[in-house]
Image: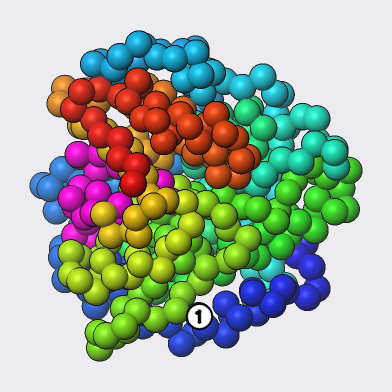
Amino acid sequence: MAGTAAPAHRAALERRLPRLRDQVPADLDPAGPAARQPLGLASARARGGLPAALGLALALSLALAAPEPARAGGPLESAFAQRLVQPGPLAVDVHDLELSDAARARTIPVRLRVPRPCTAGARRPLVLFSHGLGGSRAGGEAWGAHWASHGFAVAHLQHPGSDETLWRGRPEGVSVDALRPGMTPAQYLARVRDVPAAIDAIAALAASRPGLACIDASRVGMSGHSFGAQTTQALAGQSLPRPAGGEPAPWAHDPRVAAAIAFSPSMRDGSPAARASFATVTLPFLSVTGSLDGDVVGTGATAELRRAVHDALPAGQRRLLWIDAADHRVFNGGAPRPARPGHADDREVQRVVRAVTLAFWQATLGDDADARAWLDGQGPQTLIGSADRWLAR
């Protein structure tokens, strides 16, 4: 249901993307580490990667229950932090939509959460969430439901070709081999194109449907988990090294994207060129990761490289929430798992992440001075444990 004429910035993006097909991250390149490593089911079991891969693919989740205890080691929480932690006061309508990108003959499934009231006079900033490999528009439920209850319109995108259709209906169910066809440069570029197309379509719906009139698609927050984090990084302005090295190439920043959250962000390696690719990200950017947030599908990702994204971003508007013993799956916003030895408790991790990410959107999209002061004044330290880290610089 996108408009008939794409905005100028989207047309410019379409001109750039075909030339950059060979400049996608190494962990999505068929000739890169993913292709060189054995990715069969047995090897995934041997590395302990299958449970995490299952979590990445099955990004289905339920709304969280009543409040949980704070992270062990966290000091007394402020009243403001308690408001961030608790579900918001607004009722939320949920719409499952099929958005059309006529230029690509592509349909983009979306789950849209809209707070009530939704009138033209009650402007709601738009936040997008992009799922990980093998996921769906059900992904990120724990985050999107919380943000919407506090006044944000949230669109959970589903990316055909790297979504749950990779594994649904297969006799063996989820496996790394089933997910492999979604790990390609073409799928990466398709995801990047999905974002401006979805913003265009949602803006058109907001202008034509009274029940969606509150959605403000002119100032957008972009977020995503894992493969969705890579999508987020591109839309936030990350550049990619040229194939032969040298200066970073222009990428795909959409000027409507005003802030970004990357759950399990990615860096192809620790080289100077890889680090330099983040120098072009100039908007407020929050990285969310943990000490066990490593490789799940044989791409060579490490917890250290995920954390290194924060250090590579320009100083000034970068923030990092790093949680000790938190793994890859907990950041997809799915249903919390039972407690496991050696791992942070999912319910406690999600409690902290919900609060910090909400404050980030309030500060950046809502221009909320209290939220900004809470973030800049080390407010998140009141929620996290002694081994966790909150960096804002």
Crowd rating for badge 1 (residues with CA inside 10 Å; few <14, some 14–19, many 20+):
some
Q: Residue at x 75, y 65 (%)?
A: 2
Q: Which residues are magenta?
A: 285-310
Residue 381 located left or right of residue 93: left
Q: Quadrant of the N terminus?
A: bottom right
Q: Which residue is mark 1?
A: 17
Q: Is residue 101 above or below residue 249?
A: above
Determine the residue located farthest toward the left in the rendered image.
Answer: 46
Q: Is residue 5 above or below residue 370?
A: below
Residue 65 located left or right of residue 202: left
Front residue of 37 and 279 = 279
Residue 113 located left or right of residue 370: right
Q: Please tell me whether residue 300 belongs to the stretch shown in magenta.
A: yes
As shown in the figure, which amino acid type bears the numbered disc 1?
Answer: Leu
- Residue 308 visible (yes or no): yes
Q: Residue at x 41, y 68 (%)?
A: 280
